[in-house]
Amino acid sequence: MNDFNAMFAFDAGYKYSPRLVELIRSNRQHLGGKLFFDKLLDHRRISEAIKLYPPRSNEDLRRLHKKIVSAPFPDHEKQSLLLYILLDCRHPEDTVRQFVQQFHLPDKYGTFMRGLWYMDRMWFQAALEHVTQPSLSPLFGDDILCTLARRAPDDGPTLALAYYHAVSPPIESPKTLEALFSVMSMASVTEAFYFARRQTDENRKVLLEQLISSVLSAAPGPETANRSVELVNLPLSAEEEHWLEDYLSDGKGKSFQSATGTLTMRRIATARYQDALADWKGPAGRKINGLNWEALRLGLADGVGSHQIEKPWAAR
């Protein structure tokens, strides 16, 4: 491990190609300015080694190797970092296998390092297969979850939710909570709602508003219509009902085109028909997502015996 030439016996003069150096730097930027390898070096308190990664020459690679092997932490942790570097190199898989066998690196360390390496390469499906192993501690769990959740617009919500349900990492930062909740909202309005209920009161209100926003800001279509129906039928508490009404009537949510219609549908869904009619602001003579608001209003008026209710949009 300490002998660079022995470790890199396949090519003692090995250096990273310019293309590989550029790929690593580009991925670092896409991942918010820090690779998971950078976070490992920080975690092991050799953050000065970050400046050497990716190494641009054989000399830089030798210096990085020396920084790692001379650091004051256990050998298996040094071997884990060196394994990550070997994964970067173009060589037969046998080289990695021999390294692991030679130093008896426990499987869980090798599995986790491969997972972080895949995360840094932005091969998230492959990463998920490694970082969800039951034997692993959730080191960087918050960061992994946030990274997968923020990739959801491109990769869909499946990866982030799979990691969250498999590992249940502690959520340590507001940005991770927001990113995870956004993914949950994409996948299921109801699941997101019950998740929000398990948070602190302050976060519950913020997350409920985020959930409403995610539904009302979506492009019109059958899926949005179904999510809207799911939203207005949620089993809200009295406090949550107040938050929804306030957000859509006086808060930031009132700017949504469907804010008043959502309030109306919520009142209908909760059998508050008189309230729905008294504050009716449905769009007259138009269909939205297949719903004829004029027909709905007249039918509702018939249902509560209010046949003579004046149209609020009629010219006076």
Image (tube, rainbow, N blue to C red):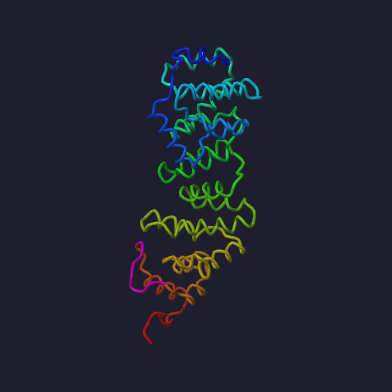
Quarter of the image that includes the C terminus: bottom left
- Name the spot of residue 79 as percent of width and height, x first: 57, 21
Q: Which residue does the image show at 49% across and 29% down from the upper left?
A: 117
Side of 42 relative to 249 (left or right): right
Quarter of the image that includes the N terminus: top right
Between residue 244 and residue 41, name the one nearer to us: 41
By secondary structure, the bulk of the magenta-drawn segment is best described as loop
Please tell me in which quadrant of the rendered image residue 122 appears: top left
- Name the spot of residue 41 as percent of width and height, x first: 58, 31
Between residue 54 and residue 169, name the one nearer to us: 54
Q: Residue furthest bottom?
A: 316
Please tell me in which quadrant of the rendered image residue 246 appears: bottom right
Residue 304 lies, with reference to residue 105, above or below; the image says below
- Name the spot of residue 312 as percent of width and height, x first: 42, 80
Residue 4 lies, with reference to residue 214, above or below; the image says above
Between residue 192 and residue 15, name the one nearer to us: 15
Residue 83 lies, with reference to residue 201, above or below; the image says above
- The magenta segment is 282-289
- Name the spot of residue 303 as percent of width and height, x first: 45, 73
Tell me how many marks there are. Answer: 0
Is residue 49 magenta-colored?
A: no
